[in-house]
Image: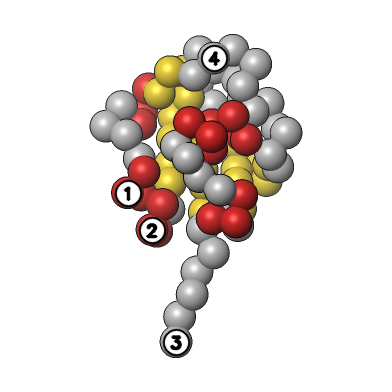
Amino acid sequence: MKVILKFEANLKKYLPENSENYEIKDGSTVADLMREFNLEESQVMLAFVGEETANLTTPLKNKQSVTLCPFICGG
């Protein structure tokens, strides 16, 4: 299946060129997707699947958008 990836802020460096049409195995979850990019749970503050807040076990469906947002630090 294919999903649309949106990585925000400093996570954008992990975004592949085919982010609008990213191939992932059927039955994959948010955690599976994060593992594909070697992203640790501590790097992601919020995840959205479609427009809904998601967690690590949220299943992904074909043509859904997946947005990952990092913790933001400032000073």
Q: Nearer the viewer, residue 15 or 51?
A: 15
Q: Which residue is pictured at 36% across the width and 43% down the height?
A: 14
Q: Earlier in the sequence, mark 2 or mark 4?
A: 2
Q: Earlier in the sequence, mark 4 or mark 1?
A: 1
Q: Which residue is pictured at 27% across the width and 32% down the height?
A: 17
Residue density around tag 3, few if under 14, some if 14–19, many if 20 or more, within 10 Å = few
Q: Which residue is mark 1?
A: 13
Cα distance, mark 1 to mark 3?
Answer: 22 Å
Q: Earlier in the sequence, mark 4 or mark 3?
A: 4
Q: Which residue is pictured at 61% across the width and 34% down the height?
A: 30
Q: Which residue is mark 2?
A: 10
Residue 18 sits in which quadrant? top left
Q: Are marks 2 and 4 in contact (CB under 8 Å)?
A: no
Cα distance, mark 2 to mark 3?
Answer: 16 Å
Q: Nearer the viewer, residue 59 or 31?
A: 31
When the figure is inspected, residue 29 is found, relative to residue 75, above or below; the finding is above
Amino acid at circle 2? Asn
Percent of width and height locating residue 15: 35, 40
Percent of width and height locating residue 66: 52, 36
Amino acid at circle 3? Gly
Q: Secondary structure at mark 2?
A: helix
Cα distance, mark 4 to mark 3?
Answer: 40 Å
Q: Are marks 2 and 1 in contact (CB under 8 Å)?
A: yes
Q: Secondary structure at mark 3?
A: loop
Percent of width and height locating residue 75: 44, 87
Residue density around tag 4, few if under 14, some if 14–19, many if 20 or more, within 10 Å = few
Q: Where residue 75 is drawn, which disc sits there?
A: 3
Q: Which residue is mark 4?
A: 25
When the figure is inspected, residue 37 is found, relative to residue 8, above or below; the finding is above
Residue density around tag 1, few if under 14, some if 14–19, many if 20 or more, within 10 Å = few
Q: Are marks 4 and 3 in contact (CB under 8 Å)?
A: no
